[in-house]
Image (cartoon, helix red, strand yellow):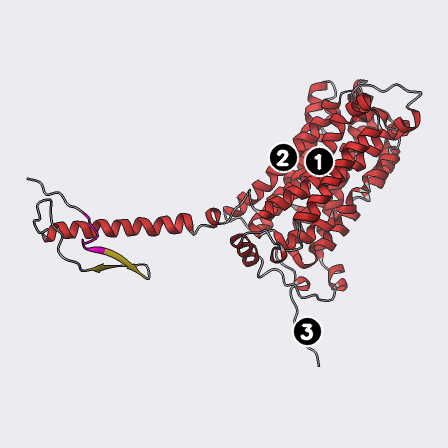
Amino acid sequence: MATVVELSPTSEQCEFVLGLPVNKKTPPRKGHRGQALGKVEEDIISLLCSLLFLLRVHYRFSAFEDPKFTIPSLCSMRYSIAFIAHICNFTLIAQNSIISITMVAMVNNTDQPSHLNSSTEWFPDGLNGDQHEASKHLSIKGAGYGGQFALWQKWAPPNERSRLCSIAMSGMILGIFAVLLVGGIISEALGWPFVFYIFGSIGVVCCLLWLILVYDDPVSHPWISSPEKEYILSSLDQQFNSEEQPLPIKAMLKSLPLWSMCLCSMTHQWLVNTLIIYTPTYISSVFKVNIRDNGLLSSLPFFVAWVIGILGGLLADFLLSKNFRLITVRKIITILGNTPPAALVVALPYVQSSYIATTTFLTLSCGLSPLCQSGVYINALDIAPRYASLLMGTSRGLAHSSAVMVPIVAGFFLNQDSEFGWRNFFFVLFAINLFGLIIYLVFAKADIQEWARERKLTRL
């Protein structure tokens, strides 16, 4: 008859001392009828205890001690700050954009009837010429851009830096999308003042969230969990020190990685400004159809850009998790955000016989360009995390100088010949974009530069 084994507290037990199984001798186990167990049964039980121990160790190290399980991600404080920054960037660009949308309506609202959802139709007539008025508003975008990088140099772990920054910066694209989509509807239904009231109220809410939930660093935050705080501080321990040091201006001016980052940002922004300002004008001149009369069609490229911008950050961090070098990831993402969009713009004159193909090319070009958010635009956090806020604000300011130069160059070509003017203008755009990209690919770095490292000052 088979013997049934009962594992009771009086049985031989396996204890773990410093992670190793130790047998503790107890009175012999007995079977179902009080019979003493033989050596075979005891060996089987010891083997089972050993297997349970191995399973326990494997589960502990693969689950409980894996940062993905012990450190919160989407519900963490750092992702909450990224979401708040996303909404703040949304408000910043939305409030900037509604000025252009409502400018003419504020002056001529009694003379010109508004059209449903024709938000961008209210641009001044001069915008179809040299577009200088739009460039004035585009140049304001960099005002609140650099300051938020003072947060990410202390809040973003290196292996999550791309996705956190892309989540935050994609709010700018979402702001343009929202204004183009609903700006005309709000003005038609409620009047142009309510465009300011609604987006201004969103800005007030964002300001309150920022003041309450955002702190300079994880150490000073009162509601961050201890595991998350330790995770962030340990990941940034070798990159950032709170001790202030003099600004190495001379070394910065001689840094080729820094100059390549600034130049590539400016040439890419040339592409972005062209897409924002001139694509509606190009559609209108070629197809005699004003896509500004359709808010959904006008905003569709920016919705695609918003989605791809966030996915680009996930792609960059995924490549890093596959042991790609950081500089390789930055260059790959920057290539994807520069070359395909510029090539699609250059191809526009060759597909102008098809309205659908032209609209598709414009949508893809606008949609792919935000990939640079996870490439060149956050490269300052790699080469100089200590000065990332200053460098990103400076590079963004230089980049938006293209908002002034783009209308000048466009006016020069378009005033000569309408058909060949667009083609030549797009070829110049591609050449400028390619030039900045090549410089970045040659000189860009992703390791902390010597002038950005902590220096020990000796006082005599």
Name the quadrant of the C terminus.
bottom right
- What residue did someone put label 2 on? 308
- Name the N-terminal-most of marks 3 and 2: 2
Name the quadrant of the N terminus.
top left
Identified by mark 3, the residue type is: Leu
The kind of secondary structure element at disc 3 is loop
* CA gap, disc 3 and disc 1: 44 Å
Disc 3 + disc 1, Cβ < 8 Å: no
Nearest the eye: 61 or 403:
61
Nearest the eye: 163 or 195:
195
What residue is rendered at 65% in x and 39% in y? 371
Q: Position of residue 191 (x, y in %)?
A: 84, 25
- Residue 306 lies in the magenta-colored region: no
Residue 457: mark in rendering: 3
Q: Position of residue 438 (x, y in %)?
A: 69, 46
Whether residue 111 is visible to the viewer of this picture, yes or no, is yes
Start and end of the magenta stretch?
A: 7-13
What residue is rendered at 69% in x and 51% in y? 149
Q: Residue furthest left?
A: 1
